[in-house]
Amino acid sequence: MYSLSQQVLRTDITGMPLEWIGFKEAVRAYHLGQVAYTCGVLLYTVRGGYNAISGKRSVVEVNSIVATLGDTHALLKAREHYVPPLSNSALFARDAHLCMYCGGRFPAGELSRDHIKPLSMGGTDTWNNVVSACRRCNNHKAGQTPEQAGLELLAVPFVPTHAEYVFLQGKRVLADQMEFLLAHFPRTSPLHQRLAKTMAA
């Protein structure tokens, strides 16, 4: 059994990944009859109170992936034009905690958000203009473009899709959850290669 802190991947009824939820939200979904089906491993068994009439205790078994009923059409329509919020944690996860200039792998505390085209030159604080950079490379680049600083980008930045962003937000993503999410990434997603390298390391 897993710790109650292990996140559950919530999807819509079509299997499209929506978000990560905690065990309380998962149990609530079961209780309210919102769970259409489940897959993945059994994470935990949550025991509740006893029924006054039958004397039986309520038990909810929570799986790692839970599909819920709801406003699928509205969510799909919203995702067509979806641009996920930019945060350092999601950015560093997108770039597999690599410095996109020297290629070194660093913990989050040693990475920074670098603007390829500096803000001082009219660059924007958007997914397509930012990469993870170690402090050394970021200090060397300073307020210049990579070309001006004599640096070369190792990969082109990209805007994550909704499914990719759900993955980037995950903490301790289990193997079955990872496999499920990977199936929803675009075939051309750079994350396929980056994750393969991470798992091989």
Image (cartoon, grey):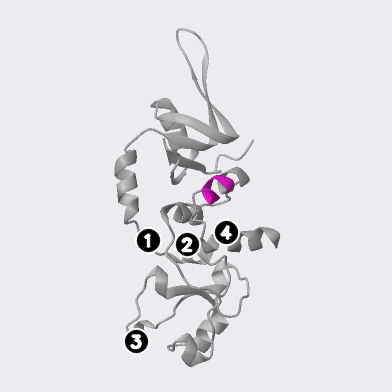
Q: Position of residue 126 (x, y in %)?
A: 37, 70
Please name the amino acid that badge 1 sits on. Pro
Q: Residue at x 45, y 10 (%)?
A: 52
Please name the amino acid that badge 2 sits on. Ala
Mark 2 and mark 4: Cα distance apart in space: 16 Å
Magenta residues, start to end: 179-183
Mark 2 and mark 3: Cα distance apart in space: 25 Å
Q: Position of residue 42 (x, y in %)?
A: 60, 33
Mark 4 and mark 3: Cα distance apart in space: 33 Å
Mark before the other along the chain sequence, 1 or 2: 1
Q: Which residue is mark 1?
A: 85
SS for dot 4: helix
SS for dot 1: loop
Mark before the other along the chain sequence, 2 or 4: 2
In the depicted structure, whether residue 192 falls above or below residue 121: above
Mark before the other along the chain sequence, 2 or 3: 2
User: Disc number at residue 90?
Assistant: 2
Q: Nearer the viewer, residue 172 or 14?
A: 14
Q: Is residue 13 left or right of residue 38?
A: left
Please name the amino acid that badge 3 sits on. Met
Q: Residue at x 47, y 66 (%)?
A: 91
Please name the amino acid that badge 4 sits on. His
